[in-house]
Image (spheres, grey):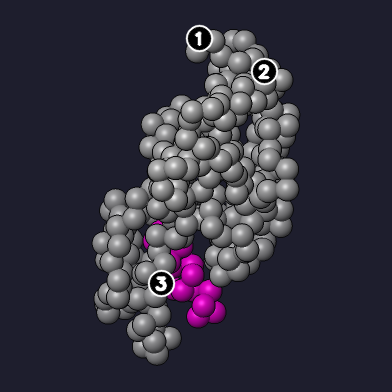
Amino acid sequence: MAGALSTIREIERELGRLRDEAGEPGAHPKLRTSVMTLMAWVPERWVDAASETLSGLAERHPSRTILLFPLPREDRDALEAEVDLRCFLRGGVEREVCSEVISIRLCGRRAAVPASVVEPLLVPDLPVFLRWRGECAWGATELEELVDVAQRLVVDSSEWSDPESGYERLAELLERVAVSDIAWARTERWREAIASLWPGVADASTLRVAGPQAEAALLTRWLSVRLGRAVKLDHEPAGEIELVAVDGSEAVPARYERLSASDLLSAQLEIFGRDHVYEETVRSFSPVLS
């Protein structure tokens, strides 16, 4: 990364330079604004997907975005950063709103201790969201430190190799941080469809789901928690939910919408309270907490 910044002071100095440059005479008036700090933990295999998702957020959620790219296998211990000011028109062509994007490569042992890097860069008095891509590093210092910094952790449990074990570990974090799960958000219209089968669903014994493992497990545990007894899952793997049936009766959503990854993440960034139904569902996976 040619010309990369290597210290927090250099990052702050570059942020200041970009702000001054944006305010130069002759340019469109630019308003630098932030409604939150959005941190994203992005391992190498998730870089392209994360970049595409985040590119669709700027206009909806002006923020200071801190992209953390861990490279723990690097021989050297260092950080390499780039700073960008991304501007877009709002309220007509005479006004531009700008968001700050800080991209940081954490090399070697720096990848295990990210809090010391991000804490000086947080926008004071604004909420902090953490989007964790891929498998959560349960118990590892990098996850523990960033959870302590954030007010909300956003995951997508369909990115986990073993979602049910992941929910057991996630339940342990619920006392420390509010959690959003994009896989749970994708089940919303299907939960509504199941509920519409009431009162017949009260006697449900089997839930058939053709869809991803995470969504199937969440739907089944949600229904079990709501009914106060175990419901058996009959699961058929698929890339997205294609079918949900309760004891042979198909649950058909009243609405259909194919949301992009940016849409799904954007919706989670508008939530500040806790989802107690989701939390009860997650806790049901833990034999200790259920």
Whole-percent x and y of residue 142? 65, 34
Q: Residue at x 44, y 51 (%)?
A: 91
Task: Please state which of residues 45 and 85 is positioned toward the viewer in this rendering.
Answer: 85
| Position above or below: 12 against 128 | above
Of all residues shown, which one is farthest toward the front? Answer: 26
| Position above or below: 162 against 223 | above
Q: Say which mark, if any, is on residue 191.
A: 3
Q: Residue at x 59, y 55 (%)?
A: 179
Label 3 neighbourhood size at 10 Å, few (<14), some (14-19), many (20+)? many
Left or right: 136, with 50 as reference point: right
Question: Which residue is denoted by mark 1 in the rendering?
Answer: 2
Whole-percent x and y of residue 101? 54, 32
**Circles 1 and 2: CB atoms closer than 8 Å:** no
The question of residue 218 being in magenta is answered with: yes
Whole-percent x and y of residue 80? 58, 17
The question of residue 22 being in magenta is answered with: no
Q: Alpha-carbon distance for marks 1 and 3?
A: 49 Å
Highlighted range, magenta = 214-231
Question: Which residue is denoted by mark 2 in the rendering?
Answer: 10
Q: Main secondary structure of the magenta part?
A: helix
Question: The C terminus is located in which quarter?
Answer: bottom right
Res. 138 in view:
no
Task: Please state which of residues 197 and 150 is positioned toward the viewer in this rendering.
Answer: 150
Q: Residue at x 61, y 22 (%)?
A: 17
| Position above or below: 93 against 229 | above
| Marks 1, 3: nearer the viewer | 1
